[in-house]
Amino acid sequence: MNYNLIREKEHEEDLKRISILRYIDDDFMSICFDGFIEGAELLLNTILDRSDLSVISVNTQVHISSFDNRSIWLDVLAVDKDRRLYNIEIQRSDAGANFKRARYHSSALDSKYLLKGMDFSELPETFVIFITENDVVGEDEPIYFVERVFVKTGRLFGDGEHIIYVNAAQKDDTTELGRLMHDFFCMNPNDMFNEVLAEKARYYKEDEEGVKTMCKVLEDMRNEVREKAMAKGREEGREEGLILAYLQNEISQSAVMRILNITNDEFDDLVVYYNQ
């Protein structure tokens, strides 16, 4: 077996893949937004229809572990100057945007950031934001704000927990949110409206150092996927093992689709089948 030829072929495939990556692809989003404060501010100010939100930190692939309960990985976690927490999740699969998943993410933030000895009144305000490729709510709106209310009066409960669904299927270029969602689906940075996002994407797609970083990340991911796929495959069968690994947040949707060579619709069908 000629390993040099294999590596060259994989490198060529990586370059092709980099050229078609978009922000709606969670792998690319995670790489681009790690430490990307300006991008996080643009994203959050646009979604929340603000202009004054100031982010002080942003990290991607944040692990919230639990000894007794299910651990989760957050795609993006940002903190603003007033200590508010923002968990941004990219979901191309409708099944991955289950409403109870949003509830669990919100509770996970609470359990992680209320330390021993702190009063409940010190719980930070939290925003769990799902950016979904399709309209998972089904009411044909560009964005959905979910709040607890007193049922009889409709008055806000005001517990500081907010859940938001952004419908990325709506790309109305007459609104800031629509233009942002348009940019999330652009393969070519030159087609983007927001130069902040275009510049970051351009770095990882066109700059020599950025491309080298992306290739290294893709290589690491490929090796990780191979190891997990082999383990899951031995235990439960290749297809089922990969889907279960995805449902347990162990590998990404794009990785499963690459290994099984399936379309997004076929992936959704498998998730529904194995998640029953």
Image: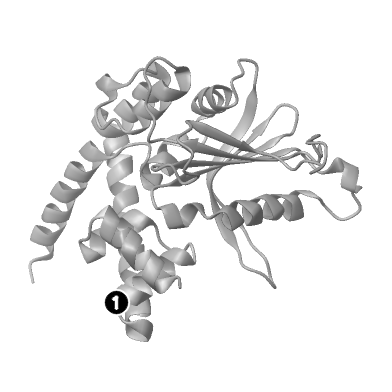
Tell me the quarter of the image containing the C terminus.
Answer: bottom left
Residue 20, percent across and down?
A: 23, 39
* Dot 1: element: helix
Residue 26 seen: yes
Residue 264, percent across and down?
A: 28, 54
Tell me the quarter of the image containing the N terminus.
Answer: bottom left
Residue 163 picture quarter: top right
Q: Would you place residue 253 above or below residue 204 in this image? A: below
Looking at the image, residue 65 sits to the left or right of residue 19; the answer is: right
Residue drawn where x is 21% and y is 48% of the image: 14
Q: Residues within 10 Å of mark 1 (few under 14, many from 20)?
A: some
Q: Would you place residue 4 above or below residue 102 in this image? A: below
Is 183 or 7 nearer to us in this picture?
Answer: 183
Residue 4 picture quarter: bottom left
- Determine the residue located farthest toward the front in the rendered image: 152
Is 125 or 76 nearer to us in this picture?
Answer: 125
Residue 235, percent across and down?
A: 38, 85
Residue drawn where x is 64% and y is 22% of the image: 54
Looking at the image, residue 238 sits to the left or right of residue 162; the answer is: left
Is 180 or 32 nearer to us in this picture?
Answer: 180
- Determine the residue located farthest toward the bottom in the rendered image: 235
Residue drawn where x is 62% and y is 67% of the image: 70
Tell me how the rendering is colored: one colour
Q: Would you place residue 156 above or below residue 120 in this image? A: above
Q: Which residue is mark 1?
A: 238
Q: Amino acid at mark 1?
A: Arg
Is 134 or 154 nearer to us in this picture?
Answer: 154
Residue 220 seen: no
Residue 254, percent across and down?
A: 32, 54
Count of numbered labels shown in the rendering: 1
